[in-house]
Amino acid sequence: MREVPITTDTIRLGQFLKLADVVEVGSDVKLLLEDGAVTVNGEAESRRGRTLTRGDVVAVDGTELRVA
């Protein structure tokens, strides 16, 4: 699992995926969400604006990223 540090208390899912270099642009996030490729804390997520906090685990196609 890779730790991805944030500088604020919370971050939106789309911003987090860009920060973690999972996607290059926000429109790529939408495609991942539509394909059902993203989970947050083990549950499927379809909202790009989902608020994440430190400790949340985001998985994209089997790659796990922890908000740190």
Image (cartoon, grey):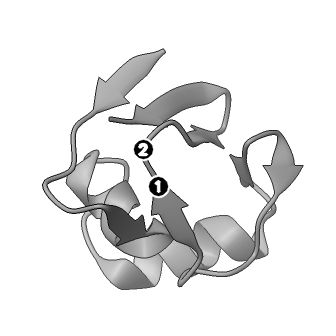
**Residue located farthest toward the top when viewing the structure as drawn:** 1
For the point 81% across and 61% down, the residue is 36
Residue 31 vertical position relative to residue 38 in the rendered view, above or below: below
Residue 35 lies in quadrant = bottom right
> Which quarter of the image is occupied by the C terminus?
top left
**Residue located farthest toward the right when viewing the structure as drawn:** 43
Crowding at mark 1 (Cα within 10 Å: few <14, some 14-19, many 20+) = some
Separation of marks 1 and 2 at Cα, in angstroms: 4 Å
For the point 42% across and 84% down, the residue is 27
Residue 29, labelled with which disc?
none
For the point 56% across and 27% down, the residue is 63
Pointer 2: what residue? Answer: 54
SS for dot 2: loop
Crowding at mark 2 (Cα within 10 Å: few <14, some 14-19, many 20+) = some
Drawn side of residue 60 relative to residue 5, left or right = right
SS for dot 1: strand
Query: Residue 21: image x %, image y %?
Result: 25, 47
Query: Residue 24: image x %, image y %?
Result: 25, 64
Q: Are marks 1 and 2 in contact (CB under 8 Å)?
A: yes
Say which amino acid is labelled 1.
Answer: Thr
Drawn side of residue 49 relative to residue 12, left or right = right
For the point 74% across and 42% down, the residue is 41
Residue 53, labelled with which disc?
1
Query: Residue 13: image x %, image y %?
Result: 48, 67
